[in-house]
C-alpha cells in the first residue's frame, strides 16, 4: 500500500515539475512524502517478518 502511494506521489511530482512547470515548495513536499512512504513500507515489512 505504501509503495503504491509512493509511486503515485512520485508521478505527481514528475508531472507537476516537467509538464506543468510548477517549481514551488509544494511540489517538493510530494517527493518528501513519497520517500517517507517508501521508508515506512520497508520498516513495517521488516517488523512483520520476525
Image: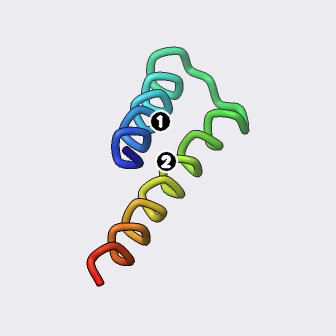
Q: Which mark is residue 21?
A: none
Q: Nearer the viewer, residue 12 or 44?
A: 44
Picture residue at 43% right of the left edge, 31% below the top = 14
Picture residue at 48% right of the left edge, 53% below the top = 37
Please indicate whether residue 45 sits to the left or right of residue 9 in the image.
left
Q: Secondary structure at mark 1?
A: helix
| Outermost residue to the bottom | 50
Q: Nearer the viewer, residue 1 or 28?
A: 1
Residue on which the image places disc 2:
34
Q: Residues within 10 Å of mark 1 (few under 14, many from 20)?
A: many
Residue on which the image places disc 1:
9
State the colouring used for the structure image: rainbow
Which tag, 1 or 2, sits closer to the chain's start?
1
* Quadrant the C terminus occupies: bottom left
Picture residue at 53% right of the left edge, 45% below the top = 31
Residue 19, quarter of picture: top left
Q: Nearer the viewer, residue 42 or 30?
A: 42
Residue 44 % position (x, y): 42, 67
Residue 25, quarter of picture: top right
Residue 3 % position (x, y): 35, 48
Q: Secondary structure at mark 2?
A: helix
Q: Residues within 10 Å of mark 2 (few under 14, many from 20)?
A: many
| Outermost residue to the top | 20
Q: Nearer the viewer, residue 4 or 11?
A: 4
Q: Are marks 1 and 2 in contact (CB under 8 Å)?
A: yes
Placement of 47 over or under 8, stated as above or below: below
Picture residue at 43% right of the left edge, 39% below the top = 5
Residue 35 % position (x, y): 49, 55
* Quadrant the N terminus occupies: top left
Amino acid at each position: 500500500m505504501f509503495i503504491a502511494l509512493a509511486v503515485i506521489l512520485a508521478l505527481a511530482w514528475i508531472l507537476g515539475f516537467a509538464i506543468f512547470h510548477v517549481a514551488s515548495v509544494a511540489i517538493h513536499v510530494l517527493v518528501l512524502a513519497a520517500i517517507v512512504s517508501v521508508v515506512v513500507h520497508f520498516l513495517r515489512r521488516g517488523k512483520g517478518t520476525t
